[in-house]
Each structure stands twice: as C-alpha cells, then as structure tokens.
C-alpha cells in the first residue's frame, strides 16, 4: 500500500496542538488536499468548537455555520458554481451575490442564510468554495491554518481580479463597510499581487494547482 500524498491528523495524539496537514509528496496538488480533508467534515471524533456536544458531523449539525457564513469564493469554485446554476456570469452574480457588497467592490455571496442553503443543506456541496470546504470549527496547527488561509485567499483574490476584469464588479457607490468587510477587502488587497494568484487564474481544476508554492 502506497503512502497517501496528503495526510491529516492530530500531532502526536496531542489534540491541543490542533489538526495538522502533512504533505508526503512534493507533487501533491490542491485536489489531493481536498480529498484528504473531506472526511474530516463528517468525523464526529474531532473536537468541533461550535458543534452540539462538540463532537458532531457537519452533516445535520444544528448550529449550521452556513446560516451566518461570510463567503467570498475562490475562482475555481466561482466558475463551477455558475456552471451548475446554468446562468451566465452577470446573472449568476446578480442572483447569488450581495448587491451592496458588490457596489463596495466585494464579491460576497448572499448571506443569512447563504443563498445556496436549502432545508439546512448546501445545494451545491460538491462545488462549494474553498472557504466553505476548509471551515471545520476545529483547532488547527499554526502552519496548517496558514496553508488553508493562503490557498483560500489566493483563490478569492483571483475571483476578485476575474470579476473586475470581466466587468462583474462595477464598484458604483460603496455602502458603509462593516469591520468584516474592511478586513476581507484588506485581505484581497494583500493577495492581489501575489504571483500564486496566476495559478488560480490559469487553472480550471483544483488538481491543476500544486501545493508546493503554498507550503
Ligand atoms: S463547521 Fe459548521 S457545520 Fe461543521 S460542526 Fe462546525 S458549526 Fe457545524
Ligand atoms: S455555499 Fe454551501 S457550504 Fe458554503 S456557506 Fe453556502 S450553503 Fe454553506
């Protein structure tokens, strides 16, 4: 049996250090990481900070963070979500993104609850954004947190650039921005000129994005 390209687990059985990603192959890509990450969502042995009893699968979780999530999708998810809805990009953005945030230059999906949540279930689960996939309400080891953070925000900055370049973000009249909006705007600015953004701009699949530049 071969070694998995990516493994995730607690560091030396010490839960307090948080979940840690270990990449065993320098050719591993983002899809390898997502494949290793997915089972964590429904692993009720993990300690999940906001889940009922702190050990609950995301499936059927009654807290359901999707009802309050702040989602700015990465570019790959953005394109796949649009394709799934059958809408062209302008229609997709108009229907599923928050108008006042678009005017302020932020590609935020309609929240409270998320526009894709129906009967407490994500209707686009297989193509949901990296931010959604990686959010687990678990303690993460520092370098793992940094890894998923840089992947998610590099992807979100690519979506922002794509939206600006294709006229999807007119930025007409900025409304009052909340502290969350300002924080996310700053993150997008921080990542906008990161050369790794090109990886998302040039790729159609997570399997096209190597992990090595993010490690
Ligand atoms: S990540 Fe969200 S859905 Fe999953 S257990 Fe935590 S609050 Fe519930
Ligand atoms: S896209 Fe799906 S997983 Fe993400 S917040 Fe919306 S309902 Fe939840």
Image (cartoon, helix red, strand yellow):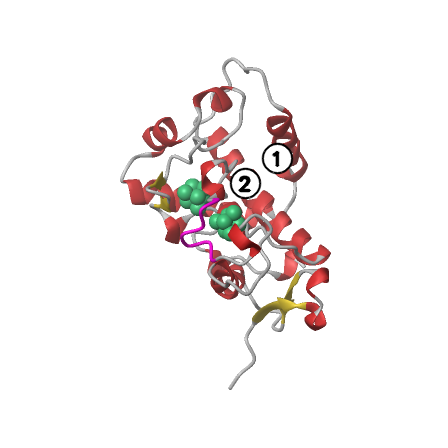
The image shows residue 208 at horizontal and vertical percentages of 49, 58
Locate ligand 2 by image quadrant. Answer: top left
| Farthest top residue in view | 173
Q: Quadrant of residue 182?
A: top right
Give the labeled residue for mark 1. 188
Q: Is residue 60 magenta?
A: yes
Q: Is residue 52 magenta?
A: no
Q: Quadrant of the C terminus?
A: bottom right
Q: Earlier in the sequence, mark 2 or mark 1?
A: 2
Magenta stretch: helix, strand or loop mostly: loop
The image shows residue 148 at horizontal and vertical percentages of 61, 52
> Which region shows up in magenta?
57-63
Front position in the image: 11 or 101: 11
| Farthest bottom residue in view | 1
How far is disc 2 from disc 1 in space, using C-alphas? 7 Å
Task: Using the image, determine if residue 101 lies above or below residue 73.
Answer: above
Label 1 secondary element:
helix
Q: Is residue 202 visible?
A: no
Mark 2 touches mark 1? (CB < 8 Å): yes
Give the labeled residue for mark 2. 156
């Amino acid at each position: 049996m071969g070694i998995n390209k990516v493994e995730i687990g607690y560091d030396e059985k010490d839960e307090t250090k948080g979940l840690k990603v270990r990449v065993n192959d320098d050719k591993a890509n983002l899809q390898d990481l997502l494949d290793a990450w997915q089972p964590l969502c429904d692993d009720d042995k993990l300690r999940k900070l906001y889940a009922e009893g702190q050990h609950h699968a995301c499936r059927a979780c009654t807290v359901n963070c999707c009802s309050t999530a702040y989602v700015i999708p990465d570019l790959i998810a953005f394109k796949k979500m649009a394709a799934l809805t059958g809408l062209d990009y302008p229609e997709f953005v108009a229907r599923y993104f928050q108008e006042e945030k678009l005017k302020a230059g932020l590609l935020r999906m309609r929240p409270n609850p998320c526009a894709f949540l129906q009967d407490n279930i994500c209707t686009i689960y297989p193509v949901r954004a990296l931010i959604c996939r990686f959010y687990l309400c678990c303690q993460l080891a520092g370098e793992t947190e940094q890894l998923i953070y840089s992947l998610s925000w590099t992807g979100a900055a690519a979506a922002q650039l794509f939206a600006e370049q294709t006229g999807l973000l007119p930025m007409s009249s900025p409304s009052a921005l909340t502290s969350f909006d300002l924080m996310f705007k700053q993150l997008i600015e921080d990542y906008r000129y990161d050369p790794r953004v090109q990886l998302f701009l040039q790729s159609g699949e997570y399997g096209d994005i190597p992990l090595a530049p993010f490690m």
